Image (cartoon, grey):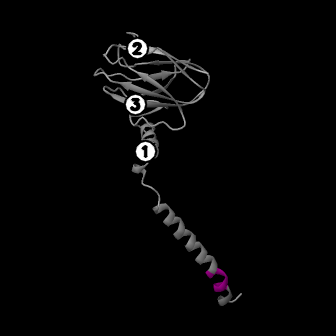
Amino acid sequence: MSRTSKARVFAPLAAAALAAAALSGCSQNNTTPQDNNPQQSEQTQQQQNAAGGTAPTSGTSSSSGAVSAASAIALAADPSGALKYTTSTLKAKAGKVAIRFTNASSVGHNVTVQDSSGKQIGATPTISQSKATLNLGTLKPGTYTFFCSVPGHEQAGMKGTLTVK
């Protein structure tokens, strides 16, 4: 094959490859910045937490309150500052579960969740006069324990049972 023949064969291929590369670069530049998408920002925060941020376990928490495709359960600390939650029983359907935790008092509280074997599967940061969302991931049917891990709070009665069916 002569040089001219090779050039005629490879020129269209090279042009097509350059066009594809240019188009893929343009499409990436037209995406919405991550900071403008709350759901993407939460996912980024969750990834940062898992990489050594504030979340101590595989469960992730967020102060934004955004929950995507999860069964969200509301839980609140006693607003007067007493060492108790407003309920000691929670129920959820099997699948993705998130706890939306509210602590309106000035006393710091959190929510920590353990499975039936005592393995911690998630925890919120300790907060006061704030809200946090704990995404527990996919839970199977069973009984889980939730409690405040601030020293002395669980022993004072700040605990309960999450039943997943």
Region of the chain picked out in magenta, as a range: 6-11
Residues at circles 3 and 1 in contact by the CB criterion of under 8 Å: no
Residue at image location 38% in from the left, 23% down from the top? 110
Q: Nearer the viewer, residue 152 or 63?
A: 63
Callout 2 touching callout 1 (CB < 8 Å): no
First along the sequence among labels 2 and 1: 1
Number of the front mark, 2 or 1: 1
Q: Which residue is mark 2?
A: 158
Q: Position of residue 66 (x, y in %)?
A: 45, 37
- The reply to whether the C-beta atoms of the residues labelled 3 and 2 are less than 8 Å apart is no
The amino acid type of the residue labelled 2 equals Met
Q: Which of the marked residues, 3 or 1, is nearer the chain's N terminus?
A: 1
Check the picture and name the quadrant holding the C terminus.
top right
**Type of the residue with mark 3:** Ala
Residue pictured at 32% horizontal, 24% vertical:
104
Three-letter amino acid code of the residue under disc 1: Pro
Horizontally, is 91 left or right of 134 in the view? right
Gap between marks 3 and 1, in whole Å? 15 Å
